[in-house]
Image (spheres, grey):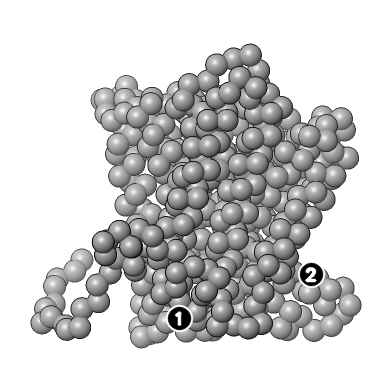
């Protein structure tokens, strides 16, 4: 009975919610009304539902061709539920963390917020949805206006939702490669992706920041410490990826188009899964850098996956503290408490163990356990696919449609855990921990 009660803890609610949404969405996508006169297997329907709900964008069938308007609407709704559902949950968790209110010690979210009389859950949720839906509508209007007739209103809204929720689903077989040289379309997509990946708490602080900047007032205090850290880290990651891709992936499309493609691919690599470059012909160097960006992902309380930018900063702070001989981890002139550092370490280890274990299984299911001379390049394709799934990015070298059924199940598991794991994993783990009230005798060990 005690173990059963743990499975009813609030930390499990997103797991049950997402699992139910995926099953219902998969059943809807198999209906004839969802398809353009074609058939869809259960595994492909469920894969599409997982990919949409977990806002990933990996596809086993051509989305724009196979699905009807109704089916595309179902996918858009699943993307919206997946993106805003997790954003809502993580924003609430972040809010409670800032107020030092325990989540695991309460029965429901509403009860856990009663300690702060200034907090109004309904107002908070309305604010979140108004801001997010307002951004999506504005994005749809911009895409419709600048696509030069390429997108109708439904297509513009679908792509705006997909971009802001960092899903990467597109109507077009070439994703967004047809817009590679269209500056307004690229800027709109990048803005939607960036805003969807920085977190809701950063979003609500941005108007105050821009208002202060435009009015000439002091910017000090217009952004919280965490928001400024998230934005700076995100911009640095975008800049690093942009420079690497521009240098490595020089094509014959001209400097402007190459620079725009490189910037777009750097923005989308951590979160969204759209592409204006052909991923299948990119160099191994670029694919390796993209793997790192995909695993890092976006920021807490956002539509993005990955281990998050804040985790990266804590890890970098830990490395610097070890090099300098500090006893305390320092990030942006602030010391980190031991609990934050331990969580960052645990989450990173969990992520890499999960990815490596999945790649091992995929080498078996996808025939990469053959002599190296027969499967050259297959390993990095599998590593790329697994990282993309865990980071809920959705980029692929073209391997996804060719996956075996066991391979699809592995990728589905990675998308599901990657979407919920960074938020739920540590909380669930804490619910199962039994604190020891004693210490064992310590020994030293030779390391390195």
| First in residue order: circle 2 vs circle 1 | 2
Q: Is residue 328 left or right of residue 251?
A: left
| Quarter of the picture holding the C terminus | bottom left
For label 1, the crowd category at 10 Å Cα-Cα, with few meaning under 14, some 14 to 19 and many 20 or more, is some
Residue 399, above or below 250: above
Q: Position of residue 125 (x, y in %)?
A: 67, 64
Would you name the residue on which mark 1 appears?
A: 336
Q: Position of residue 357 (x, y in %)?
A: 30, 44
Q: Position of residue 385 (x, y in %)?
A: 45, 38
Q: Position of residue 377 (x, y in %)?
A: 40, 31
Where residue 262 sits, quadrant-wise, is top right
For the view shown, which residue lies furthest in the front direction?
A: 1
CA gap between label 2 and label 1 equals: 28 Å
Residue 330 visible from this viewpoint: no
Mark 2 or 1: in front is 2
Q: Which residue shows up at 66% across the image and 82% down it?
A: 118
Residue 339, above or below 359: below
Label 1: state its secondary structure: loop
For label 2, the crowd category at 10 Å Cα-Cα, with few meaning under 14, some 14 to 19 and many 20 or more, is few
Q: Is residue 230 left or right of residue 130?
A: left
Checking the image for residue 427, the label placed there is none
Nearer to us in this view, 194 or 105: 105
| Quarter of the picture holding the N terminus | bottom left
Would you name the residue on which mark 2 appears?
A: 207
Q: Is residue 5 left or right of residue 169?
A: left
Q: How many marks?
A: 2
Where residue 162 sits, quadrant-wise, is top right
């Amino acid at each position: 009975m005690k173990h059963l009660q743990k499975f009813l803890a609030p930390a499990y609610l997103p797991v049950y919610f997402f699992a139910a949404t995926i099953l219902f969405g998969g059943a809807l996508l198999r209906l004839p009304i969802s398809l353009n006169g074609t058939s869809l297997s259960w595994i492909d329907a469920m894969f599409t539902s997982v990919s949409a709900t977990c806002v990933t964008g990996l596809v086993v069938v051509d989305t724009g061709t196979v699905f009807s308007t109704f089916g595309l609407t179902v996918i858009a709704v699943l993307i919206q539920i997946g993106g805003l559902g997790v954003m809502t949950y993580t924003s609430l968790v972040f809010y409670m963390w800032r107020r030092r209110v325990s989540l695991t010690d309460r029965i429901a979210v509403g009860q856990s917020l009663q300690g702060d009389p200034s907090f109004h859950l309904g107002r908070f949720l309305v604010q979140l949805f108004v801001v997010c839906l307002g951004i999506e509508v504005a994005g749809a209007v911009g895409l419709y206006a600048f696509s030069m007739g390429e997108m109708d209103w439904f297509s513009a809204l679908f792509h705006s939702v997909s971009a802001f929720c960092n899903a990467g689903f597109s109507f077009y077989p070439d994703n967004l490669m047809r817009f590679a040289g269209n500056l307004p379309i690229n800027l709109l997509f990048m803005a939607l992706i960036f805003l969807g990946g920085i977190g809701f708490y950063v979003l609500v602080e941005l108007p105050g920041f821009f208002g202060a900047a435009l009015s000439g007032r002091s910017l000090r205090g217009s952004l919280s410490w965490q928001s400024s850290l998230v934005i700076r880290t995100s911009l640095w990651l975008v800049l690093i990826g942009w420079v690497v891709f521009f240098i490595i992936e020089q094509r014959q499309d001209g400097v402007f188009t190459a620079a725009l493609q490189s910037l777009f691919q750097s923005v989308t690599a951590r979160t969204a899964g759209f592409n204006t470059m052909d991923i299948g012909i990119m160099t191994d160097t670029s694919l390796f850098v993209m793997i790192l960006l995909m695993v890092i992902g976006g920021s807490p309380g956002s539509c993005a996956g990955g281990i998050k930018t804040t985790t990266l900063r804590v890890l970098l702070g830990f490395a610097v503290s070890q090099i300098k001989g500090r006893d305390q981890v320092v990030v942006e002139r602030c010391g980190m408490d031991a609990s934050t550092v331990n969580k960052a370490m645990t989450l990173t280890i969990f992520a890499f163990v999960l990815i490596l274990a999945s790649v091992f299984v995929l080498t078996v299911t996808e025939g990469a356990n053959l002599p190296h001379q027969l499967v050259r390049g297959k390993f990095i394709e599998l590593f790329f696919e697994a990282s993309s799934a865990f980071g809920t990015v959705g980029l692929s070298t073209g391997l996804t449609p060719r996956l075996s059924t066991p391979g699809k199940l592995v990728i589905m598991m990675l998308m599901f855990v990657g979407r919920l794991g960074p938020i739920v994993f540590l909380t669930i783990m804490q619910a199962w921990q039994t604190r020891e009230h004693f210490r064992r005798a310590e020994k030293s060990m030779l390391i390195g």
